[in-house]
Amino acid sequence: MKWRYFRQGLFFGMVRLSALIITLVLLGIIAFLFYNGIRAVTWDFLTLPPTDSMTKGGIMPAIVGTLYLTVGAIVVALPLGVVSAIYLTEYAKQGRFMRIIRIGVNCLAGVPSVVFGLFGLGFFVVFLKFGSSILAGALTLGILILPTIIGAAEEALKAVPQTFREASLALGVSKWRTISRIVLPSALPGILTGAILGVGRAAGETAPIMFTAAAFFTAALPKSIFDEVMALPYHIYVLATAGTHIEQTRPLQYGTALVLIALVLGIDLFAIIMRSRVRRKKRW
Amino acid sequence: MTNAKQPLTRRVREIMIRKLFAFFAFLSVLLLGLIVLFLFREGLPLFKQISVSQFLFGSAWYPTYDPPEYGIWPLIVGSLIVTMFACLIAVPFGILSAIYISEIAPARIKEILKSVIELLAGLPSVVLGFFGMVIVAPWLQETFDLPTGLNIVNASLMLAVMAIPTISSISEDALYAVPREFKEAAYALGATKYETIVKVAIPAAFSGISTAVILGMARAIGETMVVLMVAGGAAAIPRGIFDSVRPMTASIAAEMGEAPFQSGHYHALFATGIVLFLITLAFNLIADHISTKYREEGSGTL
């Protein structure tokens, strides 16, 4: 009898310890980057371009570039994702067609990010002749986050009670009107949360933009969507691995990493808090 | 309410919308097809120069030598080794934390931990790679007196951090879906909470947990920036866990910038992408198969 409870205590201890270690790993990484990066992050760092062959100065072009790429990605992925999710939850019947789409979305979600990069290079950059550009990068990132958006939008649509749809249809409202006037507005907060998580994902990705959009260094800000841009994740990679001044530019690397995780985790945290509020405030 | 009574324009519009939406939903499948098409378009020309088995099992990766050698066996081994070690770490942590979240933790801690897992999943891989370079590498080098801290152990540790959230969140969903009655029945028979979890909840959620592990492995094998920055980059079969490796993803990411357009090297990197794509596709299809086949875990199935 005692052994049974001892074993339980031991197991629970292990389970708690693993949860604790995971939390400490996250906090440790954040704290470490914060501690080392905060000194580098000044107003000038955020608002000036790099100088002296990237050993001094700021990261403003990389911030702007990441902004363009993520906004572009979400402009591509959000409409497509929402429409796909509407089809899957509201229109599609269980059957082979739906099964194929389901497998397609799951497999797309599992494609490694570097393979998206290769695809973007082969299709957008070379075949469609966009060159290495914001357009090619944003489209590649958009496809990358599409499954995330579809998943989140589906979940939000499924959470709208069936009675809403039935009440509307019973009043003689057409199916499309029911969806656009009743179902979508109710699901909107959930869909937006998913979109924000997608933005966070897109902002932090490096491999898909390495061959499709990211530039080592640009002197000026991009003028059109056919220009190359600097991007925060790629900038970290470049500073930390390439060139002859790796040790000298450490503070810049820490600063850039801090800006990137502040941006990405800030976006994620915002989405998480918003989601739990939406769930609590539900009127149904 | 029959369709016949609706005005014609409205019916036409409804049908058009349905067809249009079906097309956009199908776009994900088309995109997947397009990815395959373009990987093959840019990768297959390599096999005019060398055979598939020379490519897959050749032990020398010297793409810039003259004559070049495009054997990716060391890269495949590198990918598999870091993935395996990462999973050795990530699987226990992922599953145990899922058990804690779904079965044991009080509501408040549960909320916090779920957010922690989600934030961990959101950590950009380049940041983890950077962390591995500046913290883990020097530490490993000093502690074990190594020539370099950029090696299999470092890459596996960082990859584990990336795989834990995948494994944890999918396992947790699976455990959460186990019907209450199962656990209540176990309690009613006098089982302790531990016995209920290990002998009832985990077996009932087993298919979901296996899916989680497979998807975690797929995540690890496809991860690029971490292995690019901390695996060391040596394209040779490693002899110990402190040796450097060059996984497939790292090789693609590192060399694509320098490979001349449409050269043998360029095609070889795309062909490596095909191999990587097929491996992760297989993982995903297996996971999909398991989760569909065993989805009906209702009260009637046991």
Image (cartoon, rainbow, N blue to C red):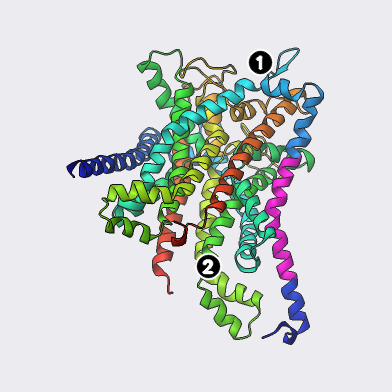
Label 1: chain letter: B
Labels in figure, total: 2
Q: Which type of secondary structure does the marked residue at label 2 adopt?
A: helix
* Image quadrant in which you'd find residue A91: bottom right
Q: Whole-percent x and y of residue A72?
A: 63, 51
Residue A173's place in the image compared with B251, above or below, is below
Amino acid type, callout 1 = Ala
Q: Principal SS element in the magenta part?
A: helix
Is residue A111 toward the left or the right of residue A119 in the image? left
View extreme (left): residue: A2
Q: Is residue A52 visible?
A: no
Dot 1, how many residues are within 10 Å of its Cα: few (below 14), some (14-19), or many (20+)?
Answer: some
Bounds of the magenta segment: B16-37
Which of these two is toward me, A58 or A212? Answer: A212
Residue visible at 65% across and 66% down? A93
| Residue corresponding to mark 2 | A187
Residue visible at 62% across and 62% down? A88
Label 2: chain letter: A
Name the front one of labels 2 and 1. Answer: 1
